[in-house]
Image (spheres, helix red, strand yellow):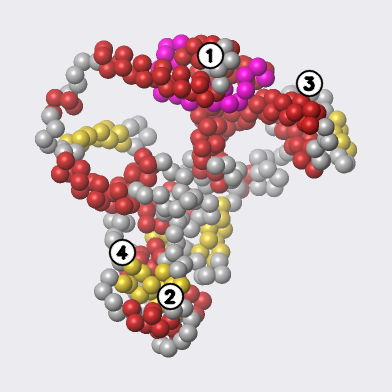
Amino acid sequence: MHSVMVDLNEASTMELVNAAAMIAAELAAREAPESPAACLELTETLVAASDMQESALAGFIGRVDAAGEQARWGYPSVQAWLRSRLGMRDSRAKERLTLARQRHRLPEVRAQLASGDLSYGYATTITDAVARLDGTDCAEAETTLLGFVDQGFSAGKVAAFGRRIRDLIAERDDAEAAPDEDSKRGYDKSWLTTTRSLDGGRYVKGWLNPEDAAIWDGTLAPLAKPAGPDDRRDLAERTAAALSSVLSGGHKASKVTVICDLETLTGGNTPARLTDGTPIPAAQARRIALSAGVSLLLLGRGNTPLYLGYRERFASAAQRQVLETLYPSCAVRGCEVPGTLCEVDHVHGWALGRSPTDIDRLALTCGWHNRFKHTSPDQIQIAKDRDGRYVYRLLPPVDARGSATGAGPPGNIGRPPDAPALDWAA
C-alpha cells in the first residue's frame, strides 16, 4: 500500500505523472468489486479519466515529434519509438501520433478531449479524417464531425462521414483543377521527375507504361512483401525500402539456403535446417548439398560461418548471403527493417582498424541505425546471442542517464517556479 499527497496547484508535471502511475499500479493490483453495477460505473469513470490522460499524452508526444528527440535516443521515427520502447501496436502508434500532430489544428476537439467532454475514440477519428485537409477545409470538417458526435452517431459512423467529406473535397478539387503538364505527356512513355527538398530528401513523381510497370512489379513486389508478422510498415514504406535496396545493390537474389554444421556434412547426425527453422535430416542434407538451386551455408562450432572471405573492405556476395540468413532483421533490438534491406556493418569499425571484413565481425543494420551507430557509438551496446549473432541494444543519451525515466532529474520537469516538492509516503 502506498500513499501520496499532491497539491495540484503546486505539483510539477513529472510529479503528477508519477502520482498517476502510482494510482494506476494500485488499481491494477486490486480485485474488481463484486457488484457488476459498481464495475460498470467504475469502468465509465476510469475510461473518461484515461481519455483525459490521452490529451496530456498527445501533448508529450507532439513535443517529442516536433523536436525530433527520439532520434537522439536511437529511434528513426516517433512511430518506431512508440512501437519499440513503449510496446504499442503500429495502429495505436499511428493513431496517437496523428492526434499529436493534428490537435493544434482542431481547437474544439483539443479542448473537449482535455475537459472530458469528448472521448479519445471520437477525437482520433476526427483527427484522422482531417489529416490531409487544408486549413479552411479542416475547420469546416471539425465543426461538421463534432455535430455528428453531438447527434449521437457512433465513432464508426463518424469515421464514415469523415471519409465521405474527403471524397467530396477530392471531387471538388478535381473539377476545379485544370489539366496539368503530367497528364499532357500521354501514357505511351515512362517518365520520372524528382525534386530535392530543403532537408536533402527528394520528392518523386512519375508514370510507368505497362512494360516498365511489369519490370517494376517483378523486381520490387517480392522485396516489398511484409518481412513477417511483426513487420508493421505499410506498403508505401516497404516499397520505398525495396527501391532503396535495389538502387544500393542490396537486393541480390539468393537461392534456397540450407544451414548445415560441418560435422553433419562429414557424417554427423545433427539435422540441418532451412532459414525458417525447418529441420532437414542429416542424411538428406548431405544428398542435397550439391543440388542445383540450393546454397549450402556451412557453420563451424559456435555457429560461426566458414570459408567466406577475409580482409576486404566490402562484404562479398557470399558473405551478404550468410548475413541475410543469420539476420532476418536489423541487428538493433526492436528494429524491424528486414535483413534483405539492411546494410553490412563492421561491428567494431573497419576504418578504425578493429574490424576486418571477416564474417564473424559483420552484422546487418538498417541504413538509419548504421549511421546512428557510427555517430553515437556510446549509445550502442553490442553483445552476442547464444547463436553467435550480434545484438545491438540502444542506450539513452549520456546526458539523460541516471534517472528512472532517462529524462533528467525526476520531480523537476514542469514544476512552477519556486514550487515545493511533493510529500511522498511509503
Q: Earlier in the sequence, mark 2 or mark 4?
A: 4
Q: CA distance from mark 3 to mark 2?
A: 68 Å
Which-is-in-front pick, marks 3 and 2?
2
Which-is-in-front pick, marks 1 and 4?
1
Within-10-Å neighbours for mark 2: few <14, some 14–19, many 20+: some
Within-10-Å neighbours for mark 4: few <14, some 14–19, many 20+: some
Q: CA distance from mark 1 to mark 3?
A: 36 Å
Q: Earlier in the sequence, mark 3 or mark 4?
A: 3
Residue 296 coordinates in the image, percent (x, y): 35, 75
Residue that appears at 45% across and 56% down: 329
- 176 or 411: nearer the viewer: 176
* Residue 414 appears in view: no
Q: Quadrant of the N terminus?
A: top right
**Which residue position is annotated with label 1?**
148
Q: Quadrant of the C terminus?
A: top right
Q: Are marks 2 and 4 in contact (CB under 8 Å)?
A: no
Q: Earlier in the sequence, mark 1 or mark 3?
A: 3
**Which residue position is annotated with label 4?**
254
**Which residue position is annotated with label 3?**
9
SS category of the residue bearing label 4: loop
